[in-house]
Amino acid sequence: MAVLNHFMQRAHFACGQTLRTHRWLAVILLITVVLFGLVAHAWWRGHTLQLALQQLPAPAKQALPVMQSRPQVVSVLQTWPSEDEADRISAEILATADAMGMLFERAEFQSVAVEHSGLQVQRIKLPLKGNYLQVRHFLQQVLQHYPSLALSQFKLQRSDVLQPELEAYVEFSLYTRKRGQA
């Protein structure tokens, strides 16, 4: 028993000395323990969720929920503009940017059919110049006004920190119904 007690005292002394002389080792050990705890907690939560999902009753027919949601999707798509309105909407988007005082030299438009659907997408590539608030307000306004408009790409660049003007590259995807689709 005395040998074991002596061994424990020596081990305690050695650990204390190591931690005092190598504080970084203690920090790394603490970070490792915390990260291990977080990973273990996430795994346990995922495992518990998986078990809970397995205990849910299976639907009688898998196609039934899909069929029930389809009319709702179709009704939303019917509110989207038709392919014939794409040019008008693109012009309105450009007019909105112009009315907000932003500068743009060119805009590119490309229309592409979405495979296996009744949708057409018009890509609108628009390099802009304006201040941060103008760009932010422009994006907010057009995205709220046109529900079938998606922001596909957005890049900001300011060449000089003293200049309030930004260069923005915005790419929208305007989804429309193909001609003849109800």
Image: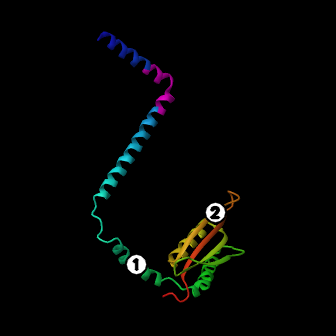
Please report the residue visible at 46 percent of the width from the left and 29 percent of the height from the top: 26
Residue 129 at what x, y percent from top left?
A: 67, 69
Task: Give the residues drawn in magenta, as a range.
Answer: 15-28
Dominant secondary structure, magenta: helix
Rendered image quadrant of residue 89: bottom right
Which x, y percent locates residue 51?
A: 31, 53
Nearest to viewer (mark 2 / mark 1): 1
- The answer to whether marks 2 and 1 mark residues whose Cβ atoms lie closer than 8 Å is no
Point out which mark residue 70 bears. Answer: 1
Q: Residue furthest bottom?
A: 180
Residue under the image location 67 percent in, 60 percent down: 158
Query: At 42% from the left edge and 39% from the top edge, which residue is drawn?
Result: 36
- Residue type at numbered disc 2: Leu
| Position of residue 65 measured from the top left corner of the image (x, y, whole percent) | 35, 73
Q: Residues within 10 Å of mark 2 (few under 14, many from 20)?
A: some
Q: Left or right: 107 with respect to 133?
A: right
Of helix, strand and loop, which one carries label 1?
A: helix
Circle 2 SS class: strand
Q: Residue furthest front?
A: 61
Q: CA distance from mark 2 to mark 1?
A: 38 Å
Give the amino acid type for the residue marked by disc 1 in the picture. Arg
Mark 2 — residue? 156
Q: Nearer the viewer, residue 179 or 173?
A: 179
Asked if the magenta segment contains residue 94, the reply would be no
Horizontally, residue 19 falls left or right of residue 93, namely: left
Height in image: 1 above or below 165?
A: above
Residue 16 drawn in magenta: yes
Dividing the picture into quarters, in which one does residue 162 lie?
bottom right
Does 152 sit above or below residue 116? above
